[in-house]
Amino acid sequence: MEAALEETGGRFSLVVLAARRARQINAYFNELGEGIGHYVPPQVHSLSRKPLTIAFEEIAEHKVTAATLDDAE
């Protein structure tokens, strides 16, 4: 958890990033049998089957990062 927190720079950013990625992972698992392929599969090998735990592991291993937008954009 410490590595993931250092990666994002704050608790709120970590929670938002992990929640968004967990939704993507959950959607990926739900569409597996349909062959659509809109979502990126999990980027880490995890023993957990919970999307939020997988998302935290991806963030801690620098597989998922948060993009920041400048005020001009």
Image (cartoon, grey):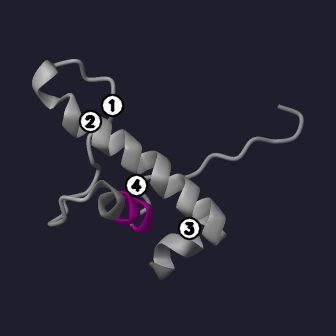
For the residues bearing labels 1 and 3, Cβ distance under 8 angstroms? no
Q: Which one is earlier in the sequence, the residue at label 4 or at label 1? A: 1
Q: Which residues are magenta?
A: 55-60
First reached walking from the N terminus: tag 2 or tag 4:
2
- Between residue 16 and residue 70, name the one nearer to us: 16
Category of crowding for the residue at label 3, using alpha-carbon neighbours closer than 10 angstroms: few (below 14), some (14–19), many (at least 20): some
Q: Nearer the viewer, residue 22 or 45?
A: 22
User: In the image, which disc is placed on residue 7?
Assistant: 3
Q: Which residue is mark 4?
A: 63
The earlier-in-sequence mark between 3 and 2 is 3
Q: Which mark is residue 39?
A: 1
Q: Is residue 48 left or right of residue 18?
A: left
What's the residue type where badge 4 is placed?
A: Lys
Marks 2, 4: nearer the viewer: 2
Residue at 70%, 47% in the rendered image: 68
Q: Secondary structure at mark 2?
A: helix
Q: Which residue is mark 2?
A: 28
Quote the CA–CA distance across marks 2 and 4.
17 Å
**Local crowd at mark 2 within 10 Å, few (<14), some, or many (≥20)?**
some
- The answer to if 58 sits in the magenta stretch is yes
Q: Position of residue 36 (x, y in %)?
A: 23, 18
Residue at x 30% of width, y 35% of height: 27
The answer to which quarter of the image holds residue 5 is: bottom right
